[in-house]
Amino acid sequence: MGQSPEVLISEEKIKARVQELATQISTDYADKGELVLIGVLKGAFIFLADLSRRLAIPRHIEFLAVSSYEHGSVRSGAVRLVMDVRRSIEGKHVVIVEDIVDTGHTLHYLIDMLKSRNPASVRTCALLHKEHKTEVDVDVDYLGFSIGDEWVVGSGLDYDEKDRTLPYIGWINSAD
Ligand code: 5GP
């Protein structure tokens, strides 16, 4: 492989921000019973692992996976569930954990789908948000960092399955 991706957000900054998010979530959900954290595969697995280990409240981990319909390289915005959670979320407090919110279609679909299962509440947590690419408005209740339009890798995010386990958030400079 060629050069390593350029550093956009360092490992230290990610660690510090994840700790802040965990502290905030622990405060918000103290005394609310077990929190269900639902990670969206594959990209959220590292963020979810880091975040969940820093929570100071009882929590249960679930995963689901989605795929977006594509026509060539153009994403239509339609999202399909390809793997579901293993337990009922009825009556539970839920936080969806995403790697990155881009157009917002994925998170919008997931919020609607999970709300229809009668949980006590549904909130959202994302490591990254490309705010000016929003096509559907979704609230990210717990956000790591806002970034620009660049394609980013690392901390669970890949480029064609590469660079997923980089400890920092990097970006691919296509001019390289
Ligand atoms: P949305 O439905 O919000 O447009 O898309 C969210 C999904 O797009 C993310 O879960 C992720 O899989 C993918 N995605 C969007 N931008 C990036 C990026 O810069 N890097 C990577 N690796 N995935 C991205």
Image (cartoon, rainbow, N blue to C red):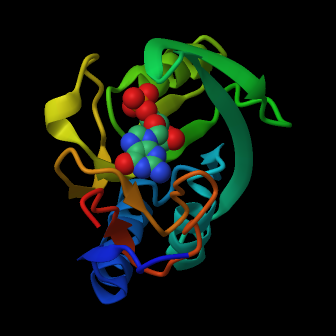
Whether residue 167 is visible: yes
Q: Position of residue 138 (x, y in %)?
A: 30, 25
Q: Residue at x 57, y 52 (%)?
A: 43
Q: Position of residue 150 (x, y in %)?
A: 25, 50
Q: Quadrant of residue 172?
A: bottom left
Total marks shown come to 0
Q: Position of residue 121 (x, y in %)?
A: 49, 30
From the viewer's perspective, is residue 72 above or below residue 132?
Answer: above
Q: Residue at x 77, y 25 (%)?
A: 82
From the viewer's perspective, is residue 16 above or below residue 169?
Answer: below
Give the residue at the far bottom of this rendering: 12
Whether residue 124 is visible: no
Locate the N terminus and report the quarter of the image it occupies.
bottom right
Q: Residue at x 59, y 51 (%)?
A: 160
Q: Position of residue 165 (x, y in %)?
A: 59, 74
Q: Quadrant of residue 10?
A: bottom left
Q: Nearer the viewer, residue 50 or 102?
A: 102
Q: Residue at x 46, y 18 (%)?
A: 75
Q: Nearer the viewer, residue 86 or 161?
A: 161
